[in-house]
Image (cartoon, rainbow, N blue to C red):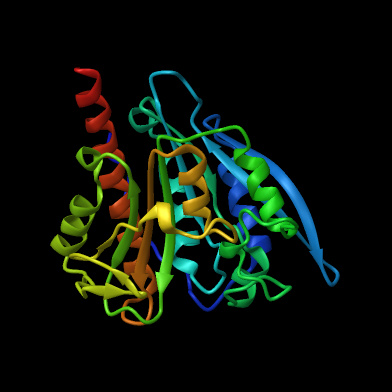
Amino acid sequence: MNTVLPTTDHPEAIRNYAELIRRLKEFAQSPYVDLELLGTFTTGFTPYPMYLVHLGKPAPHKLSVMISAGIHGDEPAGVEAAMQFIEHNVENPALLSHYNFVIFPCDNPYGWEHGLRENSQGLDLNRQFQVSNPPSEIEFIMSGFKGVCFDLVYEMHEDYDSPGFYLYECIGDPSAYLGEAIIHEVAEFGFPINRSHIIESRRAKNGIIRPNIDTYRKTRLPKALYLYRECGGKVLTLETASTYLPLQDRVRIHLLGLNVSLNRAWLHRDAMSGI
């Protein structure tokens, strides 16, 4: 059930959203891919259509997985990892017989194209969940998962200040934790891990932050915490060290983490069902 882990790279300095859409439409030629237009917003005279990718078909026996990238436009590795994951698994029947994927490949098209953390209005979109008047991008994103919960939510981010990789993990059942296995795998490939005791003003242990959801604020939530509060389950946010590693290595880390997460989540489901 392993995913294909590509090693190809795309230039980090060149970002063209029209080219990204072209790639998505090319993937959609596969019978395993459905491309859903969530909506289009316009900045200046430039339209930005936002798409949701359905990879595989839902079924009761499958794990439902959300993959999300690019809500901060200056964090391009997640977007490229999502695109490569789709590209290299559109014809992977072993994987798609066990998982159904809902993929948000680029949550902040304007920011991604212009290398900005925020959107065209200067808003950090990852603080715009659970607000009274969300921007268009958030409305489109929320329409893509309205009324749906996932067995695994996998968010891909980057940290310009971190000397190594780390992650946030929101999982209520300690027996289902994925973080240690991901950290181990990334370290095994020789990538640096941020093992500070405090990361982003939060307690961390061996590269893992497990936030206290009960004490977290109720509005202006990040996407990951919003989804966890709505549905629970397994919610991960990975942070690659963008200052210290080239794009291809950061993409590789995200795909390694995803591969570990999928396999471990499946094993946990089997263990819980007594298979």
Return the x and y of residue 11 as percentages of the image width and height. 48, 73
| Figure check: 190 above or below 223 | below
Would residue 138 be seen by someone viewing this image from the given angle?
yes
Image quarter where the N terminus lies is: top left
Residue toward you, 17 or 60: 60
Name the residue rendered at 64%, 46% in the picture.
142
Q: Residue furthest front?
A: 215
Residue toward you, 220 or 236: 220
Identify the image quadrant of residue 185: bottom left
Name the residue rendered at 41%, 70% in the picture.
158
Identify the image quadrant of residue 160: bottom left
Name the residue rendered at 36%, 56% in the picture.
212
169 relative to 186 in the view: left or right: right
Image quarter where the C terminus lies is: top left
Return the x and y of residue 271 as percentages of the image width and height. 19, 25
Please state the total of marks drawn on the protein image: 0
135 relative to 22 in the view: left or right: right
| Figure check: 244 above or below 7 | below
Return the x and y of residue 105 as percentages of the image width and height. 55, 53
Return the x and y of residue 45 as percentages of the image width and height. 86, 69
Identify the image quadrant of residue 33: top right
